[in-house]
Amino acid sequence: MMRTKLLLDLIQCPQVPGYASEHIPWSGVGSYTDAMYRILLHRKWTDLPRHMIAGMTASVFQLVVDRRLTTESISAYNWMAENFVAADFIGITTGQHGGFSFEPTFPLYQKQALLDIKASIDRGVGAIVWHDQFVICAGYDDGEQVLFICESNGNKVIHLPYDSFGRNSTPYWYYQVLESHKSIDQWEVCKESLIQAVYKWETHDYMLPHHDYACGAAAYAAIADALESGTYETDQAAGVLRYYAKSRQDIASYVGGLGHLSDQMIHVIREYVLLSDLYTQIMEKVEDSAWDAKEQGHVQRVIHLIAKAGETEQCAIDAIKHGFPETIGNRFEDIGLR
């Protein structure tokens, strides 16, 4: 039977205090958190601000760069593992699949993906889809054979033909449907998210080759090396730095409300506020015309600020470890419980 359904209220920007200003991604690229948060608001599964969801899922602590500082850095992580964990932390059960469009079995996966996505929409829940960024699928039309998708921070509807699902500028395809929601112990989740911050800082994503990517603490040296060598495009590098400037601003807002978790949190909060301020200074330099011209003295000043940011984020992680030594110590070499 041919069916059509469009979740108009999902497409319309949610009218909640602080959403519009907080939700604008500095990079211009929709993240997984952006897409998920909009669906959570639509389903009334949260009334928390975006920075709280970004923090509780631990996704805000992600720090990955490719060594040429391309905008691919923003989405370079293990989607299947990290997006599952992110949703699980906040009590969301999910179904997800992903892979490569060049595989001979892709048409079969594509067919099943369309069935899963349409079934989710029939339940009134939008789906998260990779379409060169994380977007929201808010409807479908069997007659026209199209999905209705929109970017996570806008309400413009794009028609994606069924046959084009998963066929992106890169060979990756992915989707996730949010199935149900259960209540959680918010402060225990917040505490766990800080432990995950340590894990993300100290651990290289095993899906990413070391010679192409740097993760966590190593990312700062990789950024400095790329800027020093000049092997980057100014607009793409600026997009990466904007994204991480916004995420570090979100972290500062997030940890600012967690002071009661440990007497060491005052130090954690202080370091992340300093880190956010440093990224503000970095972005002031990046928005200057001297950045586009790659003026050596100007780039050196950015490199200096990047080094200070790396030192400051290390201090923040050290403060977290001092705040929760027993929990971290009991996990031995598996802080992230992966």
Image (cartoon, rainbow, N blue to C red):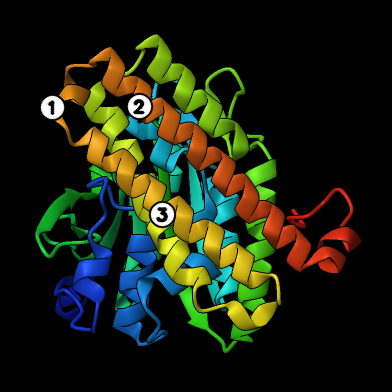
What separation in Å lies between label 1 and label 2 (alpha carbons)? 14 Å
Q: Residue sitting at 56 percent across and 87 percent down?
A: 182
Q: Which residue is mark 3?
A: 276
Q: Earlier in the sequence, mark 2 or mark 3?
A: 3
Q: Amino acid at mark 3?
A: Ser
Q: Which residue is mark 2?
A: 301
The spot of residue 149 in percent (x, y) is 20, 58
**The one of 142 and 275 positioned closer to us in this rendering:** 275
As helix, strand or loop, the secondary structure at mark 3 comes to helix
In this picture, residue 4 sits left or right of residue 334:
left
Up-down: is 336 above or below 52? Answer: above
Q: Amino acid at mark 1?
A: Ser
Q: Which residue is mark 1?
A: 289
Q: Residue sitting at 15 percent across and 62 percent down?
A: 154
Disc 3 and disc 1 in contact, CB within 8 angstroms: no
What separation in Å lies between label 3 and label 1 (alpha carbons)? 22 Å
Q: Is residue 177 at all visible to an observer of this figure? A: no
Up-down: is 150 above or below 213? Answer: below
The spot of residue 258 in percent (x, y) is 57, 77
As helix, strand or loop, the secondary structure at mark 1 comes to helix
Q: Earlier in the sequence, mark 1 or mark 2?
A: 1
Q: Residue sitting at 26 percent across and 65 percent down?
A: 23
Q: Quadrant of residue 50?
A: bottom left
Q: Residue sitting at 55 percent across and 57 percent down?
A: 271
Task: Please tell me whether mark 1 or mark 2 is closer to you in this view.
Answer: 2
Residue 131: mark in rendering: none
Q: Is residue 91 at all visible to an observer of this figure? A: yes
Within 10 Å of disc 2 (Cα), the crowding (few <14, some 14-19, many 20+) is few
The spot of residue 61 in percent (x, y) is 53, 54
Within 10 Å of disc 3 (Cα), the crowding (few <14, some 14-19, many 20+) is many
What separation in Å lies between label 2 and label 3 (alpha carbons)? 17 Å
As helix, strand or loop, the secondary structure at mark 2 comes to helix
